[in-house]
């Protein structure tokens, strides 16, 4: 904690979030009664180019308040690199190597400031409606995928969600390359036979990948890495994406998914989980694929319809499949994997337990990256790296210096708010200010000086009284 005479503090001690203006509630409203959007369709799509690095090392930043009061809950065996970063800040870190049940999570949410999850904690809007989380400041998803349906509801509560947008892209691309060759050569079947003592030397329906067409659905961080690796092996790369993307090497973008389905010898899925990608590949799409072609899914289980895939494999329309993700995945190792039965034993089908990004390199990188983003947000209010709020940061921070206060005001993006806020700040010296909006939520950060200790409460109350307020934090 800060050692100057003015003990630095975060004045957001209690719930200070306003409901959306469309909801009529009293100030004592808990989160349970907020009405959330059920879809994020109006929310701007996150471009895979939107991330930019923040150069200030975490350890150089001042700690603005008693960091040992901050409670962090890390679920799903998040890499120890994250714990190291968070514990170094003095935060209390509670760690679980598995996901919690919905009720367990709701119970924990009552008390914590930061939640860290991976892909098995869905965090749907229904949980947010049921839960009470008065202290929750931020969520870290220690992976690429984020709880898409809850991003907007969380933004509307002023809670940023941070992820690690490309730390595991290379690991997923490498696993996909491995699976392409495994499928082309039926390697797992030969391996299983020989483990049973059966010598089965065959070349029928075994292929080189050189010259074959790889069809990539979703040419983002992973799809584009894969494109480069596949071309190096002599594959012809085509891809389909909903936005125009610069093709790498000799890869070519096609205009429709159907065009890709018809062309590909190997079809591989790398799209995010979203309403538009739910069931993207079903019976109709599989029927359009070449006879004897292969499909790979390392994106999300919701993207590919399993019963349709099983039919296409049983009828030998497809030559094989590699699945790393499934519609219902267990939250803990060792659990029975329900739904595996229909896939188990099918020839040339590779099943892996969601390990695309499960490498030492990727997990260490993710742990550091997300933990550092969380530290920056908790300690200084920086939203750089957030996927659901505008990215706002001010360089340097005089928090802890007498008379200096960092004002963070998350508010509804409406006309006149800046004028009102600056009306409240007008008697102090505004050293720096930055404001940005993303859809209906805006984020203002200002460093002010010449503030007397006794003025801080009044400053806070005045900001809180604005009807546009979602959350106010004063760091001093
Ligand atoms: N198996 C694993 O362990 C693992 C690891 C990391 C990521 N993932 C999954 O892979 C997904 C992709 O990761 P990424 O880093 O490449 O994401 P990304 O955001 O960089 O790229 C996704 C691409 O998909 C495109 N897209 C979106 N909707 C589409 C649609 N309907 N049709 C075609 N293209 C569409 C986007 O425009 C974007 O270019 C993640 O969202 C995550 O769910 C899985
Ligand atoms: O770490 C995991 O749970 C896998 C996450 C992976 O699918 C991702 O979205 O990064």
Image (cartoon, grey):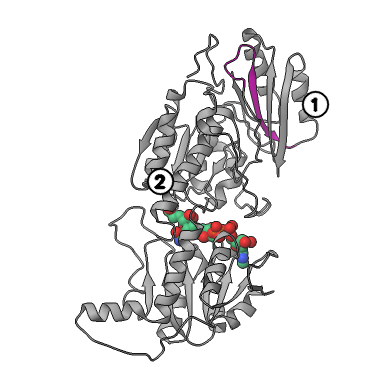
Determine if the C-beta at disc 2 is less than 8 A from ligand 2: no
- Location of residue 330 in the rendering, given as x and y in whole percent from the top left corner: 36, 57
Examine the rendering and report whether any part of residue 250 can be seen. Answer: yes
Start-end of magenta stretch: 398-413
Is 126 colored magenta in this rendering?
Answer: no
- Element type where label 2 sits in the image: helix
Q: Do the residues labelled 2 and 1 touch (CB within 8 Å)?
A: no
In the orientation shown, which residue stands out farthest toward the front? Answer: 232
- Element type where label 1 sits in the image: helix
- Check disc 1: other Cα within 10 Å, few if <14, some if 14-19, many if 20+: few
Q: In which quarter of the image is the C terminus?
A: top right
Examine the rendering and report whether any part of residue 111 can be seen. Answer: no
Q: How many numbered discs?
A: 2
* Residue 342 placement, left or right of 287: left
Give the distance between the C-alpha atoms of the residues marked 2 and 1, in whole angstroms: 42 Å
| Identity of the residue drawn at 32% across and 80% down | 189
Q: Label 1 belongs to which residue?
A: 419
- Between 211 and 222, the one lying in front of the other is 211
Image quadrant of ligand 2? bottom left
* Residue 360 placement, left or right of 242: left
- Between 22 and 277, the one lying in front of the other is 277
Q: Label 2 belongs to which residue?
A: 102
């Amino acid at each position: 904690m800060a050692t100057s005479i003015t003990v630095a503090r975060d004045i957001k001690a209690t719930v200070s979030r306003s409901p959306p203006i469309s909801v009529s509630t009293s100030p004592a409203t808990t989160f349970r009664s907020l009405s959330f959007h059920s879809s994020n369709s109006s929310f701007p799509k996150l471009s895979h180019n939107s991330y930019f690095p923040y150069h200030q090392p975490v350890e150089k930043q001042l700690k603005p308040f008693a960091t040992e009061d901050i409670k962090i809950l890390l679920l799903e065996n998040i890499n120890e690199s994250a714990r190291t970063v968070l514990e170094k800040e003095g935060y209390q870190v509670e760690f679980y190597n598995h996901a919690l049940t919905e009720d367990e999570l709701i119970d924990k949410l009552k008390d914590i400031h930061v939640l860290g999850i991976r892909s098995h904690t869905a965090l749907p809007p229904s949980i947010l409606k049921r839960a009470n989380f008065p202290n929750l400041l931020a969520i870290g998803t220690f992976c690429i995928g984020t709880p898409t349906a809850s991003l907007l509801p969380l933004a509307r509560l002023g809670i940023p969600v941070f992820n690690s947008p490309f730390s595991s892209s290379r690991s997923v691309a490498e696993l996909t390359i491995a699976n392409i060759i495994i499928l082309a050569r039926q390697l797992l079947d030969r391996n299983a036979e020989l483990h049973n003592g059966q010598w089965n030397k065959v070349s029928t329906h075994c292929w080189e990948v050189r010259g074959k067409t790889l069809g990539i659905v979703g040419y983002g961080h992973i799809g584009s890495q894969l494109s480069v690796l596949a071309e190096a092996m002599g594959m012809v790369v085509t891809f389909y994406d909903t936005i125009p993307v610069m093709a790498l090497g000799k890869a070519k973008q096609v205009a429709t998914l159907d065009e890709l389905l018809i062309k590909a010898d190997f079809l591989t899925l790398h799209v995010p989980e979203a309403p538009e990608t739910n069931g993207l590949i079903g019976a109709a799409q599989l029927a359009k694929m070449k006879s004897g072609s292969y499909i790979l899914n390392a994106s999300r289980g919701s993207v590919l319809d399993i019963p349709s895939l099983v039919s296409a494999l049983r009828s030998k329309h497809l030559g094989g499949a590699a699945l790393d993700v499934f519609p219902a995945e267990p939250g803990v190792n060792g659990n029975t994997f329900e739904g595996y039965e229909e896939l188990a034993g099918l020839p040339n089908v590779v099943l892996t337990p969601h390990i695309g990004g499960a490498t030492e390199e990727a997990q260490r990188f993710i742990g550091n990256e997300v933990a550092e983003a969380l530290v920056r947000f908790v300690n200084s209010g920086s939203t750089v790296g957030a996927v659901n709020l505008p990215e706002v940061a001010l360089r340097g921070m005089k928090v802890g210096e007498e008379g200096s206060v960092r004002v963070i005001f998350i508010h509804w993006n409406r006309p006149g708010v800046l004028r009102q806020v600056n009306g409240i700040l007008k008697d102090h010296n505004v050293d720096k200010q930055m404001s940005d909006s993303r859809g209906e939520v805006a984020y203002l950060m200002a460093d002010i000086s010449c503030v007397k200790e006794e003025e801080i409460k009044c400053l806070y109350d005045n900001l809180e009284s604005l009807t546009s307020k979602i959350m106010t934090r004063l760091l001093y």
